[in-house]
């Protein structure tokens, strides 16, 4: 069996960082992720957290030597453990504890003296239970379990298991839902659009600062990978945007309380803006502005509005440079709705 050499990966990473250092013809790059889903045997075999630790440290040494501003991303884990005979995956929290030398429990302690050098931890929190659903197994991490992963990451940073000259960030570097159309049995595109905005809200409140969507355009046909922000076409210039593109670009959510409505969103300019919150009664009728909120310097806005609203109302946000968000119903979908991320 071929044994990966961390030193060789480090040499490759140095050559890569030098090539994309902005001093040559290639465009500059300063973010380097070490592997994809290393807890999954289909992507890295054997699955071994200690070996992956060596890979991350080798890449970090090389990439940081080229520039101290470069960021090294570790993790990018598959969300589910699996013990199938043909392939297997270690549950992400178990893999993370092994990588970071931390014990299990609410107050993890150090289990070895090894450290890991990275600047960003990333994850792929696919879910079968909507944007707030939890994974079935305790060490798996879907959207609703991100706070557990963040807690473990913070414990590792606090106990100096992670070494970085930057504040350690938490990213989601792969996430999506296949949609109907075109995929049979996938989440209806309208529901997936609502879930996209809610997923971004869930990630934000879990401490995630960057999200990358899996797929710009549908693959075509009725097979997997129909999770694009655009429907399939002969070229991207001809591709029609799905509603979830608007939800990804300008996410907005609104939840009905007793005599109030809690709203959250992020305007598409990612800057300080005055955001108007508008209401419409029912599926038809005129939009009327009911509040104005100022977003922060990263475009985030949130408020609890004193508003006599009902489940029949819809809200949306609008801002200069961003246009309109999708209309968001105050009637919540059934929590029993279940659609897998890949139309399964």
Image (cartoon, rainbow, N blue to C red):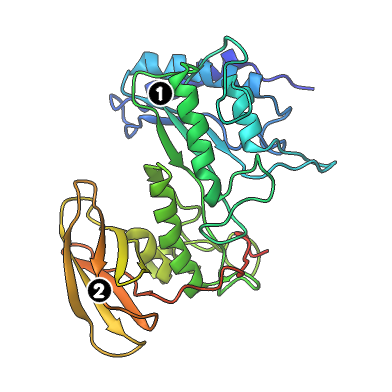
- Neighbourhood count class around disc 2 (C-alpha, 10 Å): few under 14, some 14–19, many 20 upward: some
Please indicate whether residue 184 sits to the left or right of residue 88 in the image: left
What residue is shown at x 16% (from left), y 51% (from top)? 272
Q: How far is disc 1 from disc 2 in space, using C-alphas?
A: 53 Å
The picture quadrant where one finds residue 112 is top right
What residue is shown at x 33% (from left), y 25% (from top)? 21
> In this rendering, is residue 212 above or below 151?
below
Q: Position of residue 99 (x, y in %)?
A: 60, 23
What residue is shown at x 64% (from left), y 43% (from top)? 140
Q: Position of residue 7 (x, y in %)?
A: 57, 13
What residue is shown at x 49% (from left), y 25% (from top)? 155
How many tags in the picture?
2
CB contact under 8 Å: marks 1 and 2: no
Quadrant position of the C terminus in the picture? bottom right
**Foreground of the two, 221 or 107:** 107
Q: Tag on residue 17?
A: 1
Quadrant position of the N terminus in the picture? top right
Q: Tag on residue 277?
A: none
* SS under mark 1: helix
Q: Tag on residue 307?
A: 2
* SS under mark 2: loop
The picture quadrant where one finds residue 41 is top right
> In this rendering, is residue 206 above or below 151?
below
Closer to viewer: mark 1 or mark 2? 2
User: In the image as oriented, which residue stretches furthest toward the top?
Assistant: 113
The answer to whether residue 97 is visible is yes
Task: Mark 1 or mark 2: name the one nearer the start of the chain.
Answer: 1
């Amino acid at each position: 069996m071929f044994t990966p050499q961390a030193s060789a990966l480090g040499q490759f990473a140095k050559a890569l960082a030098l090539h994309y250092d902005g001093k040559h013809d290639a465009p500059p790059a300063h973010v380097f992720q070490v592997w994809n889903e290393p807890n999954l045997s289909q992507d890295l075999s054997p699955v071994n957290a200690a070996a992956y630790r060596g890979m991350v440290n080798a890449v970090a040494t090389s990439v940081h030597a080229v520039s101290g501003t470069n960021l090294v991303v570790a993790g990018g884990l598959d969300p589910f453990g699996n013990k199938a005979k043909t392939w297997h995956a270690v549950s992400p929290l178990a893999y993370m504890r092994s990588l970071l030398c931390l014990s299990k429990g609410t107050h993890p302690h150090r289990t070895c003296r090894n450290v890991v050098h990275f600047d960003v931890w990333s994850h792929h929190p696919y879910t079968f239970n909507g944007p707030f659903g939890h994974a079935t197994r305790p060490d798996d991490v879907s959207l609703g379990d991100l706070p557990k992963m963040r807690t473990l990451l913070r414990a590792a940073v606090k106990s100096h298991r992670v070494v970085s000259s930057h504040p350690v960030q938490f990213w989601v570097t792969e996430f999506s839902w296949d949609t109907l159309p075109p995929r049979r049995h996938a989440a209806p595109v309208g529901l997936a659009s609502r879930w996209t905005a809610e997923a971004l809200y869930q990630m934000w409140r879990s401490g995630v600062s960057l999200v990358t969507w899996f797929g710009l355009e549908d693959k075509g046909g009725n097979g997997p990978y129909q999770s694009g922000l655009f429907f399939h076409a002969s070229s991207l210039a001809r591709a029609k945007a799905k509603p979830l593109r608007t939800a990804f670009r300008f996410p907005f959510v609104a939840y009905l309380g007793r005599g109030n409505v809690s709203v959250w969103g992020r305007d598409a300019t990612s800057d300080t803006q005055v955001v108007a919150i508008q209401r419409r009664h029912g599926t038809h009728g005129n939009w009327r502005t009911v509040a104005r909120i100022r977003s922060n310097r990263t475009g985030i806005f949130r408020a609890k509005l004193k508003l006599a609203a009902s489940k029949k109302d819809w809200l949306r946000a609008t801002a200069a440079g961003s246009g309109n968000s999708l209309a968001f119903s105050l009637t919540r979908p059934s929590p029993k709705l279940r659609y897998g991320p890949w139309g399964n």
